[in-house]
Image (spheres, rainbow, N blue to C red):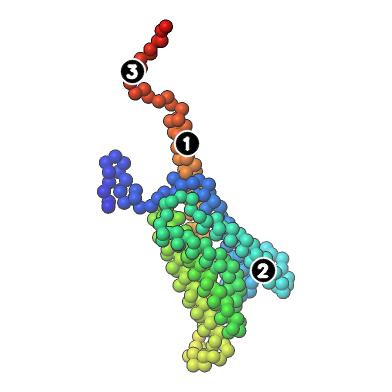
Amino acid sequence: MRIQPAECGTPVEDSLWRYRLRYADPTWVRRLAHGLGCIELAVIVLTVGLMIVGGSPLFPLFALASDLQFLWVEHLDFLGAPLTLAAFVFWALGIDGIRSVCGPVPDTFTTPSSEWTRKAARYTGIVAWLLTPVGLAVVLEARAPGVVCFGSVCMLAAVGGVCLLMTYFGYLSARLPDRSLLAQWRLVAGWTAVVWIIKISVTNMDVLIRHGVLPGMSRALTQVNLWTCTVHVFAFLAVVLAIWTMVLAEQLRRRLLEASALAAETQAAGSTASESASVSPAPSTGPTTEVEGGD
């Protein structure tokens, strides 16, 4: 339906594609923007915490800053404390953000599929947010097979929840409407799932090889340092995806703030029109005759 009406010139397909957030409750739209801001801040806090952990691919940044005396750290014996603090802040901000973004929609412009996505993103996103620091601490550093298996399960559940959360962010982008932002959310969600599944699989394989569970594979990879090769590739892809996700989240947050302002203007204009209609005199329906009574 690419028909363009002569009055406005807007294609009918674009007009009917999605319900626009500029006509929604402005308080709800502002709450969406607030939730995205909390999620962004939580990711930044966890990223800084991971920079302090030696098993993280971001640790070289911390080591470089320490060498340049930007951070005065002489002993690295208490690295668990900063990560633990970062995890608690990450949990508090992230859960508050997810509850704000994935809260009930105050209008009726939803479909059964979008409502299911919202509820699934809300609950799985909270579970994923709780499991992410646990899974990262285990998967980013090779340990015993049983511990890595536990961390892998946590990380797979976290990746699934985060990808579903990104899907709901794409739905919000569709309601702006912004097709480009929607397509980017779908793309980054797919690549996030692929990269983390590969990373988790390689980590488990490397641990099994190191403990002699796969002797044939160990002999085949004698000349190849699987851990070193994959860590560098994963670090590059993970950082690119993280930066991309943060950029998309910030774009969506700003667009939501713009939609909130437009929604407030639309609501104010509607209230003014209603008040004008209520105070205007009713039109006369016909001539009136004044009859004087007499004795």
Specify whether 175 is left or right of 89. left
The amino acid type, in three-letter code, at marker 1 is Ser
Residue with the most extreme front position: 295
Q: Which residue is tagged 1?
A: 271
Amino acid type of disc 3? Pro
The amino acid marked with disc number 2 is Thr
Q: Residues within 10 Å of mark 3 (few under 14, many from 20)?
A: few
Location of residue 231 in the rendering, given as x and y in whole percent from the top left corner? 54, 76
Q: How many marks?
A: 3
How far across and how far down the image is residue 5, in percent? 27, 43
Q: Residue at x 54, y 73 (%)?
A: 155
- Could you say which is closer to the camera, residue 231 or residue 91? 91
Mark 1 to mark 2 CA distance (whole Å): 50 Å
As drawn, 242 above or below 108: below
Contact (Cβ within 8 Å) of mark 3 with mark 2: no
Query: Which circle marks residue 84 in the picture?
Result: 2
Q: As drawn, which residue projects farthest toward the top?
A: 295
Q: Please tell me whether mark 2 sits on a helix, a strand or a loop.
A: helix
How far separated are the C-alphas under marks 3 and 1?
A: 33 Å
Residue neighbourhood size for the residue with mark 2, other residues' Cα within 10 Å, grouped as few (<14), some (14–19), many (≥20): some
- Residue at (60% x, 72% y) in the render: 134
Residue holding disc 3: 287
Q: Nearer the viewer, mark 3 or mark 2?
A: 3
123 vs 221, nearest the viewer:
123
* SS assignment at label 3: loop
